[in-house]
Amino acid sequence: MKNITIKKITIALLWLFIGVHSTMAQDNFKLPAHTQVTYDNGLTVYFVVQNEVPLVHFRAVFPAGVRYDSPAKAGLAGLTADALSTGTLHYSKAQIEETLDFLGASISNSASTEAATLAATFVNKDQYQVLPILAEMITQPAFPEDEFEKMSQRAIAGIDQMRESPRSVIDNYFNAMVYKDHPYANIASGTKKSLESIAASDLKEFYEAHYTPRGTVMAVVGDFDLLAMKQALENLFMNWENNTPPPTPAVAIKVPTEANVVIVNKEDARETTMLIGGVGVARNTEDFIGIQVINTILGGRFTSMLNDELRVNSGLTYGARSSFNALKEGGTFNMSTFTANETTKETIVLALKTYQNIFDGGIDEKTLASAKNYVKGQFPPDYETNSAIARFYTDAFIYGIPMNYIDNFSATVDGLTIKKAKIIIERYFPKDHLQMVFVGKASVIEPLVNEYGSVKVLEITKDVYQ
Amino acid sequence: MKTQKHLLWGFLLLVQLAWAQNKASDVVSFTLKNGMKIMVLEDHSIPNANMYLFWKVGSRNEYPGITGLSHFFEHMMFNGSKKYGPKMFDRTMEAAGGSNNAYTTENLTVYTDWFPISAIETIFDLEADRIADLALDPKMVESERGVVLSERSTGLENSNFRNISEQVKGAAFLAHPYRWPVIGYESDIKNWSIEDLQAYFDSYYAPNNAVVVISGDVNLVQIKNLATKYFEPIVSKATPRAIHTEEPEQIGQKRVTVEKQVSTPNIMLAYHVPETKHEDYYALDLLSAILSDGNSSRLYSKLVDQSQLATSAFSYMPESIDPNLFYFYAVASPEVAPETLEKEMVQVIETIVLEGVAEKELQKVKNQKLVALYNTLETIDGKSNTLGTYELYFGDYKKMFEAPAAYEKVTADDIKRVAQKYFNKKNSTVGYLIAPENNTK
């Protein structure tokens, strides 16, 4: 594959898998019309009718993310979200699976840092068979003991399996370094130790505290009759009761005051996988679109500065990129790449030098114009599917993204000037006290990284992240 | 009575397909004078379009010494041609708002461009330039070797599947080029020459060896004009030599072990099965779905849920020009010996061989296939990729629209028959991926 870091193509993953007119066309791209309903219990639902295929996508997002875990029971939010499909008041796990599988319906339920999500896609004519099951999973989950035991054992085994791949764990180390005491540092999968301390009763308790209609948002997008769908959702969710008050905000995210380096030793590593960065921005930051344009130039596309230097010019890596991971109260920024053990130092030096260029040299008109065209041109396909549109509405609700984000996207991009770009770089891209994680052979890496901060060495097989 | 009900169910599903926006007749196909086949599907839902270029060359066209060259070539196609020198392909495309990628398989090399409709002529110009006049720059070749070595390394570093599948393929195939990994052997990546690359380009990158699919906010007249202007002048070449090597029939089980620092064993079973154009394809594909798709599938329910011997399990059958493999994969739970898990995996297979599958189970996967097709048709990307896939592997893009009917025809007896025909010990290769300390037996 040419590049996995820019766009993933599943088939290949398994196997080895300007112009004046543009401004006009992309400007015409608008968010499809929606209907919004808020019930007396506080639940907000968005409906969007789209007729391209006879499918419906349902998405429910709950204020029940990993951030609400306590360190002692890390992994609880994830297990609770997973357990929504293990049985309800009227349906066993097997009944749920057999019914939904037979209809070709697919469901997914999991917790990410900010929130938990239950999403499903099904054929429109099946809505009266599918929706009542989804509603029970949301409002009357049973958390059966026997299913919990199996799930818990798999989750514990999954910790060691995950640690076989640097790419699956490196973010956990980085988040622990950057977020420190803030709950965004919580590890979604937990640790073996924390998972062993969690019982089915903990899931029930977590569910009661966090699956509340007041903080929940749903979006239904697809080919359906609007009136009938509104009625169906009302019947299923209007009487969902849970008066637990919404959670309060957490402590502020502190910007690191010193540079830190974590080396994660993987004895049999053939390469070094690395993340370099620091504190980023909240998703509703008013300059979010401008930040995305600048990041496109730095490390968000194939011709970006990082990929050009580290891959195209020097052949050190298959890919180098940068990204902002933006959540509700804040986020992280990082550059990421990997290289053969022997070229570790060369790669770090070149990555840091390239990063410094955005502060020193700034960005020229031609590059800025190219990046603006690029983000505008690549924008509409991001909202092409029912599930993507549903996700926009639920994200807007959870993260406080303005509803005119899509409609105003092109104009906002067009408004970015060189002068503004400079301000954005100085304000949002961390310059000092960079935080670094290297996963690889510690004996190779340790002698190379002292100059970048105080160094700590961890073992990839050990059950800790700091 | 039961059968009749299912027939009716199937009929309803077929009627529903007609409601979906696209029909086979919405796709217009034409062939340029140089033999390049082009398919166009207009879809005005977003102001964007894509171009997929499918080249009939993959790792099956290689031989020892140049293994991995198809994939390496995929990279070199971005590294400069006559009009657009090194870096200019990507820079020009991205400045016009477009992005691209490419992938290589055992059978094909596929290039993908995604762009706002305003960039359509730029895309034709860029593609035509590299197809007609690729310039192999020795400096770019050298730096790209590093990139591909890193791609190979990062796959092996992060994926157990990659580690074991390379070895299982190598054992299962004695003669056919499917025996080596698509990315190639490390020594070949380090040593092929610029002459090897030029010879490959001259053999395979001919307009008559490609199929182009364009979907999105385009109009047919415009596409015909651009194709005539940019693609038609590219000269056709002799048809590449056919791959005539047939894998000899397997005459006994083969076994391989890979040592790697893993927490629990990973197991892969592989059985030789025919090519995609074969009449047994649809039955085998549905069988894979019965085994794998959803938590009610055979492998998940038996191995992960009931016996809890595995933490994950699935089957996989790639689309293929020549006869290939049907894979089973499972990751063991802690303390489970690979032999125990292997025995249970074989038991799941044996049960189908002996008892077949239930009507309802079969109808379930037929329903799932239909929803999968709808999901594909939801995006212009899915449309182009799937149309091209059907054209290349099934011989005709129209088969995409006929797939629900083809699946509907498969009976439970067909499933049992193909299971009996292909899932026997003599036809199998077993791979264990285990920690060195557990490989002392």
Image: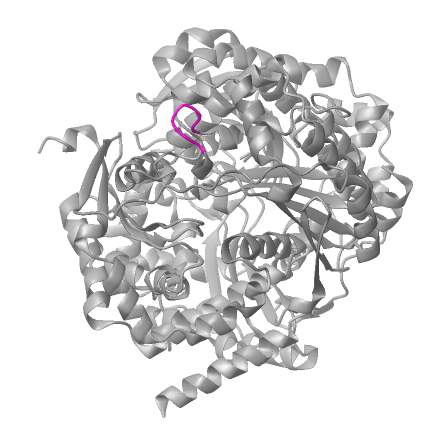
Residue shown at the point (54%, 19%) measured from the top left: B195
Q: Which is nearer the eye, A392 or A135?
A: A392
| In this picture, residue A149 sits left or right of residue A232 | left
Percent x, y for residue B263?
25, 36
Bounds of the magenta segment: B62-67
| In this picture, residue B430 sits left or right of residue A45 | left
Question: Taking B339 as reference, is B423 above or below it?
Answer: below
Percent x, y for residue A34?
74, 66
Q: Which is nearer the eye, A464 or B122?
A: B122
| In this picture, residue A84 sits left or right of residue A197 | right
Q: Residue furthest front?
A: B238
Q: How many marks?
A: 0
Whether residue B306 is visible: no
Q: Which is nearer the eye, A344 or B24?
A: B24
Percent x, y for residue A114?
55, 47
Image quadrant in which you'd find residue B233: top right
Question: Taking A167 as reference, is B187 above or below it?
Answer: above
Q: Residue furthest bottom?
A: B1
Percent x, y for residue A56?
59, 69
Image quadrant in which you'd find residue B6: bottom left
Q: Which is nearer the eye, B109 or A156?
A: B109
Is residue A173 on the magenta stretch? Answer: no
